[in-house]
Amino acid sequence: MATLKNTTINDTGYLQNPNGTTAQRPGSPTAGMQRYNSSLGYIEWYDALGSTWRPIYQAPNVSVDYLVAAGGGGAGHGGGGAGGLLTGTLIGLSQGVSYTVTVGSGGAGGISGSRGPCPAGTSGSNSVFSTITSIGGGNGSTAGAANASNGGSGGGQGGDQPSATRTSGTAGQGNGGGRSSRGGYGAGGGGGGAGAAGADATDETSSIGDGGNGGVGIQNNITGTSTYYSGGGGGGSNLNAPDYTANGGGLGGQGGGGNGGRIVDSGGNPGTANTGGGGGGAEYEGAVAGGGAGGSGIVILKISNGYTATFSVGITSTVDSSSVPGYKIYRVISGTGTVTFS
C-alpha cells in the first residue's frame, strides 16, 4: 500500500473511491476514511469523534403523505368502535433511514358458542408510521355491563345499560360510542366512527327497540379515489321485538363498519378489512353466532415518483404508480416492520 503526502492530482479526470455496501465497511475504521456506500448511494467518511459514518453528500429529504387507520374494535351486543384515523404529511424524512410501519389487526368479536347475551368483543390494535400512531377501536360490550371501551373510537354499550357513560374516542382520531336502549333485553348502541359518534339504540316501546347505527367514517382521496375509512359498527337488536325482520340491528357506518344482528340468535357482521371499520353487534341472544370482528387497519403512503419505498420482511404492500400522476402510492395491508426511502 502506497503512502502519499501533500499530493496534487493535476488532471481533469477523476479519483476513484473504494466502492462497497454498508456491510462491507472496514471493521476497524479510523478518522477520515472515505468510501462510496453502494447500499445508500453516496460517498461517506468516518467521524472518529462521533464513532459513526457520515455522508459527504446528504441525500434530499423525502416528504410523505400518509393515511394511518388502526384496527376496528370487535363487537359484543354493542357495536365495535372504528380504529383511529390520522392523515397528513411528514416533511424531511431522511433517505436510507428505517421508519416503523405497523398495520393494526381488528379486535375479535365476542362469542360463547351457546345461546345467551353476547360477550364483549376485544379492542382493535394500533397502526403506526414513523411518529404517527393511530389507536385501535374500542370494543363493544355485552348486555347489562358497562364494559364497552374507549379507543380510537369508542365501542357501543350493550343492552340493559342505557345509563352507562358514553365511551369516548381519542381526540383528533375518532368519536364515542352509543348507549343501549332501556328495559329488559335492550338493543345495543352503535360504535363510534372517525367522523361521527355512534348512535344510541332506539328506546323500547312494548319491547321494541333497534340497535344504534355506527358512526360514519371520514372520506379521503390519498389514493386518487375518494374513499371512506374508519366507520363504527352497528348495535345488535333486542330480543323481544315481535317482528325480527322489521326491527333489528343498527347499520354500520360508512367506512367499513359491520351491520348489527337483527333477528333472533343472529350475529353481527364483521368490519371490512383494511378500513379500520368496527364490528357489528350481535342480537341480544346472539352469542352462538357472536359479535362481528373489527376490520384490520391500513397504512397508505404517497411519495413523489422520484423516490422509492422499500419495506422489510413481514410487510405486505402494493404500489400504484398510475392513479395519481407524478406519485407512487403504497398500500400496506398487513404486518409490522420498517420502510426506507431512496
Image (cartoon, rainbow, N blue to C red):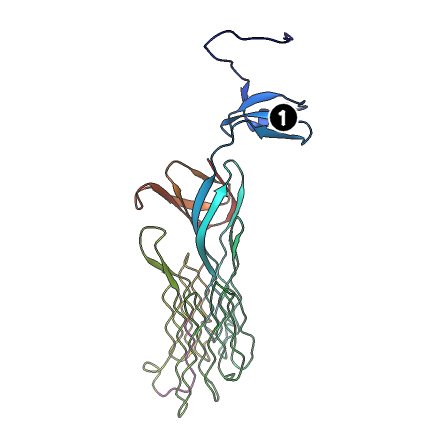
In this view, 198 is above or below 39: below
Percent position (x, y) of residue 284?
46, 80
Split into 4 quadrants, where in the image is the N terminus?
top right
Q: Specify the principal SS of the magenta part.
A: loop
Q: Which one is in front, 156 or 4? A: 4
In this view, 122 is above or below 127: below
Q: Look at the image and give the residue range highlighted in magenta.
A: 233-242
Res. 33 visible in picture: yes
Which corner quadrant of the image does residue 8 belong to?
top right
Percent position (x, y) of residue 242?
36, 88
Residue position marked by numbered label 1 in the rendering: 46
Percent position (x, y) of residue 312?
51, 41
Q: Which one is in front, 165 or 77? A: 165
Q: Residues within 10 Å of mark 1 (few under 14, many from 20)?
A: many
In this view, 16 is above or below 181: above
Give yes or no for residue 272 being in the magenta stretch: no
Percent position (x, y) of residue 22?
57, 28
Q: Of the residues shown, which amino acid type is indicated by label 1?
A: Tyr
Please tell me how many numbered marks the rendered image carries.
Answer: 1
Give yes or no for residue 238 being in the magenta stretch: yes
Q: Which one is in front, 198 or 268? A: 198
Which corner quadrant of the image does residue 232 belong to?
bottom left
Q: Is 138 positioned to the left or the right of 31 in the image?
A: left
Q: Secondary structure at mark 1?
A: strand
Q: Is 69 positioned to the left or the right of 322 in the image?
A: right
Res. 299 visible in picture: no
Outermost residue, bottom side = 206
